[in-house]
Image (spheres, helix red, strand yellow):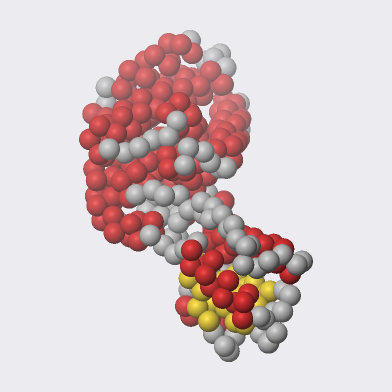
Amino acid sequence: MIRYLIKNNLKLMVRSKLNILLYVFFPLILIAILSSAFHDLMKQYEDATVCAGYRMEEGVSAELADALSEVAEENGIALVEYPDGDPEEIIRERAYCGFVIFEEDSYTLYQNSDENEMGKVLEYFLHAFYANAAVTRMGADTDTITLHIEHPEYKPAIDSTDYYGIVEIIYFACNSIICGTAVFMNEKKYGIRKRYQVSNVAEWKLYFGKFIPILLAVGIGSVLSAVLSVILLDVHWGDPLLSSGILLICAGAGAAFGIMIYSFFGNMVATVILTFGMSWVAGYFGGCFETYMYASHPMAVKLASPVYHVNRALTELSCMGHSDYTVSAILYNGGIILLCSVLAVFAGVLRKRGKA
């Protein structure tokens, strides 16, 4: 029975012209528009410099101050001196990633909470600088000491085409429930849903008879769109197998959430509105419209969006070849699939028993 449902529902979805347009060609159109519109903005980000204010207190040696300025400049860190003024106000007014007050044997660092990545670079720079400077204070010849400051990668070096070429395909995959609209509408039109309710077919089989075809149809469409984005727009995807897997899990989360909503309300219009609204909110905070690199939302809000984890993982796989968000993207969206699937099956069981 379940194989029959999967086969017929998949045929119905794949033959839909709307689904082909929505999951294969619409993302490409949006990618072309957004990548062109935000090209200069993303280029500006690639060329960004770590900027911070600083102040030298009494007792700081001129030798240490000169070495600090020289090493900072070599490592692409712009330090601007402010003899007076409140550090926190200067950070807000100048949008600096931090402010440093240098004392004789220590320093105090104020950081901008919205500049986490650049703030980490500044913090690492100061730690490395003082670690090297401590060697000179232990009696080493300052003329032969070289301060070795490594400048770690603090931001993905990714252009607008690659960024939007990835995140827009993800966004359409999140709205995977729309792919199953034809199936749900046919069930209601021909009274198939009522027949299911009085049948002896297990509810989990009916659920997977919809979930698997939606996942396969959206997966096929998204992968085709990704391949075309490489051919037509020169989008670079990192680790094709891993990226495809994350994309499928994201589509599965969208499908499971949509089916769960439909199981509760039994109305396709309400389901589409609710799922589209939720995916738009998750996509907005996840960086599908405003790049997560420039977004001013608190980090806690970004991390609450499952789309953010997927966007971050796939864009970093593209530009760096690895990402710390790969595991969280899989676990977060996998958790959504599991929870929504259980709730959808439970709602179907209650409906069969006449309690819903």
Percent from the top left, x then y, of residue 99? 58, 75
> Which residue is more in the foreground, 10 or 125?
125
Residue in the picture at 31% in, 39% down:
235
Lateral position of residue 181 relative to residue 63, left or right: left
> Does residue 298 appear in the picture of this structure?
no
Percent from the top left, x then y, of residue 185? 35, 30
State the residue lying farthest toward the bottom. Answer: 84
> Does residue 209 appear in the picture of this structure?
yes
Percent from the top left, x then y, of residue 176? 40, 35
Lateral position of residue 267 relative to residue 135, left or right: left
The answer to whether 331 is drawn above or below residue 72 in the figure is above
Quadrant of the rendering where the C terminus is positioned: top right
Find residue 168 and report its image quarter: top left
> Which residue is more in the foreground, 215 or 269?
215
Tell me how many marks there are: 0
Percent from the top left, x then y, of residue 196? 48, 19
Residue in the picture at 57% in, 17% down:
202
The answer to whether 305 is drawn above or below residue 350 in the figure is below
> Which residue is more in the foreground, 208 or 145?
145
Residue in the picture at 37% in, 15% down:
8
Residue in the picture at 49% in, 13% down:
2
State the residue lying farthest toward the right. Answer: 138
